[in-house]
Amino acid sequence: MARRKRSKRLEVAKKMPRLYHTLPGEGYDPEKSEVLEWLGEQHEMMEWLFEQLRNAGYVEYDPETGLWSGIEC
């Protein structure tokens, strides 16, 4: 069985330092996740995510306004 090809842009995650996703002694809060904060700062990762959303048809471009939006807006 063939392995699915992975995007080179995801390789940035290989260089993620040791970070908390849930802070010790606290419940999970995405607003406090060091992992999510770091990932959000990685342009390659954000470009990959946007491409996935675009390819799935969840976001669309309006050439008249030059704006992108979710398909349910």
Image (cartoon, rainbow, N blue to C red):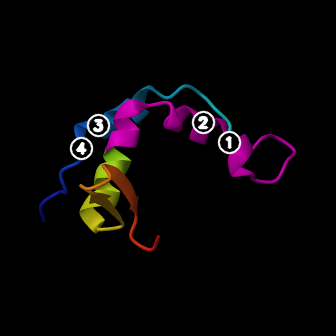
Residue marked by disc 2: 37
Residue 45 placement (x, y as % from top left): 38, 39
Query: For the residues marked 3 and 1, what is the alpha-carbon distance in whole angstroms?
Result: 21 Å
Query: For the residues marked 2 and 1, what is the alpha-carbon distance in whole angstroms?
Result: 6 Å
Which residue is at 29% across, 68% downward? 57
Element class at badge 2 = helix
Question: In terms of sequence position, does the residue under pointer 2 or pointer 4 come before the other?
Answer: 4
Question: Is the residue marked by circle 1 packed among few (<14), some (14-19), or many (20+) residues within 10 Å?
Answer: some
Q: Are marks 2 and 1 in contact (CB under 8 Å)?
A: yes
Residue 17 placement (x, y as % from top left): 55, 25
Asked whether 16 falls inside the magenta stretch, the response is no
Residue 33: assigned label = 1
Which amino acid lies under the numbered mark 3 shown in the image of this protein? Arg
Q: Are marks 1 and 4 in contact (CB under 8 Å)?
A: no
Q: Are marks 4 and 3 in contact (CB under 8 Å)?
A: yes
Query: For the residues marked 4 and 3, what is the alpha-carbon distance in whole angstroms?
Result: 5 Å
Q: Along the line of sight, which residue is nearer the eye, 19 or 29?
A: 29
The quarter holding residue 23 reads top right
Which amino acid lies under the numbered mark 2 shown in the image of this protein? Glu
Element class at badge 3 = helix
Q: Is residue 13 above or below residue 22?
A: above
Residue marked by disc 3: 9
Which residue is at 39% across, 70% downward? 71
Query: For the residues marked 2 and 4, what is the alpha-carbon distance in whole angstroms?
Result: 21 Å
The quarter holding residue 48 reads top left
Query: For the residues marked 1 and 4, what is the alpha-carbon distance in whole angstroms?
Result: 24 Å
Magenta-highlighted residues:
21-47
Residue marked by disc 4: 7
